[in-house]
Image (tube, rainbow, N blue to C red):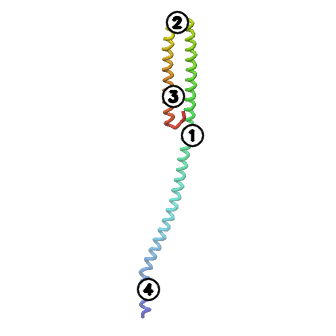
Amino acid sequence: MAENIVEGFRKVIQDLVVPEFKALQGEVKHLGERVASQGEELKLLRSEMCARFEKVDERFEKIDARFEKVDERFECVLREMRELREAAMAEINARHQETLHRFIEQGHVLGKIEGTLSMVNVKMDYLERVERVEEVLRRITAKIGIEF
């Protein structure tokens, strides 16, 4: 009789527990499938992100190339400005020397010197303006990280 009671008890427990275990087994299987599909989704997402990062890197490389071209243009413009300034100063000095010699030779030294001084002042203003432009260009190039 004790065996029948144990057997009956076992059967009742099995009747109660087995369906729950099967239900849990189904849920675990479903969760496993879901995790696997999300793993695939993550792989796809990673590959998409890598592709996007590659595109961003390409864009940055293009921007870097453009900045290098801008740097070269600035260097060229600055070099030309220096050459023009040097040429202008050489011309100013040559004309000043010529004018001074002519005035001395003609004997109109004092009157002509005043005219020359005013001309030199005008040309000095020109030099100051060129220096101001250079200073502005230095600030601009410093802001964008280019050596002047």
**Label 4 secondary element:** helix
> Which one is in front in this view, the residue at disc 4 or the one at disc 3?
3
Give, as a three-letter code, the residue at label 3.
Glu
**Label 3 secondary element:** helix
Whole-percent x, y for residue 41 in the image: 50, 59
- Decide: few, some or many residues near mark 1? Use Cα within 10 Å; few <14, some 14-19, many ≥20: few
For image coordinates 49% across by 17% down, the residue present is 121
Whole-percent x, y for residue 136 in the image: 48, 30
Residue, disc 4: 10
**Label 2 secondary element:** loop
Query: How many numbered marks appear?
Result: 4
Whole-percent x, y for residue 71 in the image: 55, 35
Residue, disc 1: 65
- Decide: few, some or many residues near mark 4? Use Cα within 10 Å; few <14, some 14-19, many ≥20: few
For image coordinates 51% across by 34% down, the residue present is 141
Chain-order first, disc 4 or disc 3: 4
Chain-order first, disc 4 or disc 2: 4
Q: Is residue 82 left or right of residue 4?
A: right
Whole-percent x, y for residue 1 in the image: 42, 94
Say which mark, if any, is on residue 134: 3
